[in-house]
Amino acid sequence: MTDLDIAEVALRAGVPASTLRFYEERGLIAPSGRRGLRRQYDPGVLERLALIALGRTAGFSLDEIARMFAPDGRTRIDREMLASKAAELDRTIHELGALRDSLRHAAACPAPRKRVPRRP
């Protein structure tokens, strides 16, 4: 398959070209070369960008995501880091559930509403 230019990668990955350049600066992706002034990428970069997007959605920092890739570009799974993130998400889900329940309770509370006098 032929290389893709930066505009095509941006379109297919659903990110602006500036994000691709930023990821390149951070060492998350690398162009395969240039055609004129335009960066060219191997089509495999789309899979890598999908993994980066998944990591970002899960709440991983770019540094944490970078550690998930070996120097040769292959993924390396840090199962301890994944388990830690899953536990963090469990805590967040629990906290959000408690907040949701509190809001529902307050909304359904039969206590009379008190008007707070306005200050002059």
Image (spheres, grey):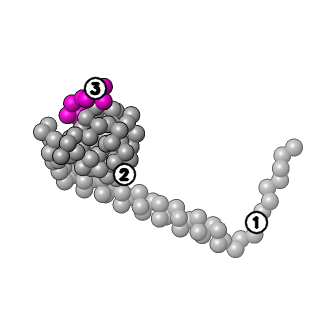
Q: Which mark is residue 36?
A: 3
- Give the residue drawn at x 15%, y 48%: 76
- Residue 68 visible in rendering: no
In the picture, the quarter occupied by the C terminus is: top right
For the residues labelled 1 and 2, the Cα–Cα distance comes to 40 Å
Tell me which label, 3 or 2, sits earlier in the chain: 3
For the residues marked 3 and 2, what is the alpha-carbon distance in whole angstroms?
Answer: 34 Å
Queried whether the magenta region covers residue 21, the answer comes back as: no
Q: Position of residue 112 (x, y in %)?
A: 75, 69
Marks 1 and 3: which is nearer the front?
3
Q: Residue drawn at (31%, 57%), measured in percent from left and top?
A: 87
Can you identify the residue that label 2 sits on? 57
**What amino acid type is highlighted by mark number 3?**
Gly
| Amino acid type at mark 2 | Thr
Side of 78 relative to 102 (left or right): left
Query: Where is residue 9 drawn, in percent x and y?
Result: 31, 42
The residue stretch that appears in magenta:
27-38
Looking at the image, the residue that sits furthest to the top is 37
* Residue under the image location 25 percent in, 53 percent down: 82
How many numbered marks, from 0 up? 3
Which class describes the residues within 10 Å of circle 2: few (<14), some (14-19), or many (20+)?
Answer: few
